[in-house]
Image (cartoon, rainbow, N blue to C red):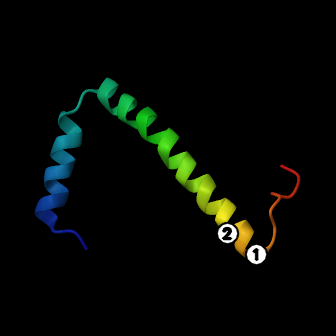
Amino acid sequence: MPHRGGVRAADELIGSLDRRHLDELAHRLIGPLGRLLRAELRLGRERTGRLLDGGR
């Protein structure tokens, strides 16, 4: 569990950021996180022997 001081510092940092900066950060993170998630799902399907995603 994180130290409360660290949580407070993170809250202050996020509160000080401009909304546009938060939106930009979110958009920059979506691509890489999406790729990681898809890769993990693909590995899970390979482990279970289901290479296709059920018609998707």
Q: Position of residue 19 (x, y in %)?
A: 31, 27
Quadrant in which residue 23 is drawn = top left
Residue at image point 53% right, 53% down: 36
Q: Which secondary structure, mark 2?
A: helix
Q: Position of residue 28 (x, y in %)?
A: 42, 35
Task: In this rendered view, identify the residue nearer to me: 12 or 52.
Answer: 52
Q: Position of residue 52 (x, y in %)?
A: 83, 58
Residue situated furthest left in the rendering: 5
Residue situated furthest top in the rendering: 20
Is 54 on the left or on the right of 46, as rendered? Answer: right
Picture disc at residue 48:
1
Quadrant that contains the N terminus: bottom left
Is 13 on the left or on the right of 54, as rendered? Answer: left
Residue at image point 62% right, 53% down: 38
Three-letter code for the amino acid on which mark 1 is drawn: Thr
Residue at image point 71% right, 74% down: 47
Q: Residues within 10 Å of mark 1 (few under 14, many from 20)?
A: few
Three-letter code for the amino acid on which mark 2 is drawn: Gly
Q: CA distance from mark 1 to mark 2?
A: 6 Å
Q: Are marks 1 and 2 in contact (CB under 8 Å)?
A: yes
Q: Which residue is mark 2?
A: 44
Is 43 on the left or on the right of 4, as rendered? Answer: right
Task: In this rendered view, identify the residue nearer to me: 26 or 55.
Answer: 55
